[in-house]
Image (spheres, helix red, strand yellow):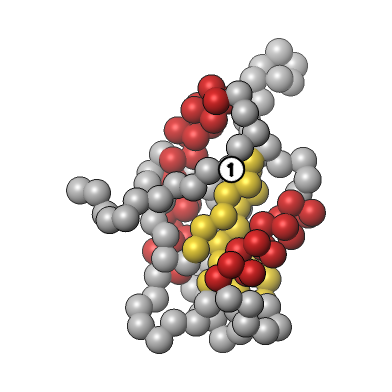
Amino acid sequence: MKNGKQSKPKWTVGVITAPRTQGYYLDKTLSSISNAGWDDVTVFAEPKSVIPESFDGYVVNRRKQYGDWTNWASGLYELFLSEPDSDYFFMAEDDALVCKGAKEYLEKTIPLLRLRIAFYLHSQKIQT
């Protein structure tokens, strides 16, 4: 709380990406993250990854291929080290879609849990 007003929590957001032989989703992932309410995103890109020209965030270009788990864990660790004052960290893969309003929903519900936790937002299929 600042000056008697509830302050907005600070989010730090990262997305991992790798080159793909079939399908390209990073542009849709970044767009969905923006539509969900997050504007400042860091992309952790493995070598030869294609980054959308329209992306104006920060890109960490990996020197070698890490693989999904190592790129994800290293990316989260780098975000934690660079933004230790963040209230929440959000990591996604380059083929994830985030629903509109997700940030607002999470900001309302996470405090109700009264725990410092990690959780995974995931659905096996697209819900219509």
**Quadrant of the rendered image containing residue 42:** bottom right
The residue sitting at 44% across, 40% down in the picture is 102
Which residue is disc 1 drawn over?
A: 118
Q: Against 2, is 20 above or below?
A: below
Q: Against 60, is 120 above or below?
A: above
| Residue 104 in the image, given as x and y percentages of width and height | 48, 34
**Quadrant of the rendered image containing residue 86:** top right
For label 1, the crowd category at 10 Å Cα-Cα, with few meaning under 14, some 14 to 19 and many 20 or more, is: few
The residue closer to the viewer here, 6 or 112, is: 112
**Is residue 56 visible to the viewer in this orientation of the structure?**
no
| Residue 21 in the image, given as x and y percentages of width and height | 40, 86
Residue farthest to the left? 128
The tally of labels here is: 1
| Residue 106 in the image, given as x and y percentages of width and height | 49, 35
Left or right of 20 in this view: 71: right
For label 1, the SS is: loop
The residue sitting at 60% across, 58% down in the picture is 14
The residue sitting at 52% across, 77% down in the picture is 18
**Quadrant of the rendered image containing residue 114:** top right
**Is residue 92 visible to the viewer in this orientation of the structure?**
yes
Q: Against 21, is 54 above or below?
A: above
Which image quadrant: the N terminus?
top right
Residue farthest to the top? 4
Residue type, mark 1 in image: Ala
The residue closer to the viewer here, 35 or 61, is: 61
The residue sitting at 57% across, 55% down in the picture is 91
Q: Against 66, is 57 above or below?
A: above
